[in-house]
Amino acid sequence: MKTIFAFFMLFSFIQIGSSQISAKWIGGHSGRPNDWNCSNNWSNNKVPNEFTDVVVSFVDFNDPTYPIIKSGLCKVHSLRIQYGTILKIDSKAKLTVLTESSTPLDLRTIKLKGSLVTPNGSMEIAYQGL
């Protein structure tokens, strides 16, 4: 009986630990308004990771605070960039998107100096201006 209970608890923990999370870019945190790695710039107050479905949304026309990944390796479960905004990936940064979202990525909304790896892993883009 203890073995069954332990197995059930372990299975429950694995399920909870791997569930998907949604996060929407809100940006604008004082001193770090465009910093992807600032938890206060996200709707759930957490920096996205491989379990996060990310939505980069248009925030404010008068004060655009689009996200910038300045350095390091970032992974997200999925990525959707809404019309009217961009995502910038600097030269020391790499973003890997693990699965496709319901809306295909429009590469015109991504300003690359670093790298982007798409869900099927077949596309890696390095330096595309900005």
Image (cartoon, rainbow, N blue to C red):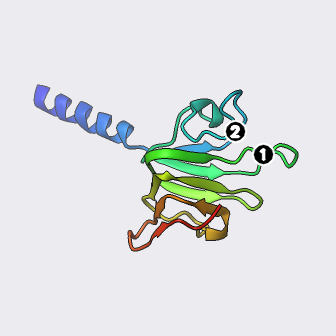
Q: Residue at x 62, y 61 (%)?
A: 111
Q: CA distance from mark 1 to mark 2?
A: 8 Å
Sequence order check: which comes first, mark 1 or mark 2? Answer: 2
Where does the image place residue 121, in percent across and percent down from the top left? 38, 68
- Up/down of 98 relative to 7, above or below: below
Residue that mark 1 sits on: 59
Q: Are marks 1 and 2 in contact (CB under 8 Å)?
A: yes
- Residue 27 badge: 2
Q: Residue at x 64, y 44 (%)?
A: 24
> Hey, what amino acid is under mark 1?
Val
> Hey, what amino acid is under mark 2?
Gly
Where does the image place residue 46, in percent across and percent down from the top left? 54, 33
Which residue is nearer to you in this view: 81 or 116?
116
Which residue is nearer to you in this view: 71 or 25?
71
Q: Residue at x 48, y 45 (%)?
A: 71
Q: Is residue 96 left or right of residue 45?
A: left
Where does the image place residue 35, in percent across and percent down from the top left? 61, 39
* Quadrant in the picture for the C terminus: bottom right
* Quadrant in the picture for the N terminus: top left
Q: Is residue 61 left or right of residue 35?
A: right
Q: Residue at x 31, y 34 (%)?
A: 13
Residue 5 visible here: yes
Q: Residues within 10 Å of mark 1 (few under 14, many from 20)?
A: some
Where does the image place residue 14, in percent across and percent down from the top left? 30, 39
Disc 1 is placed on an element classified as: loop
- Residue 85 badge: none
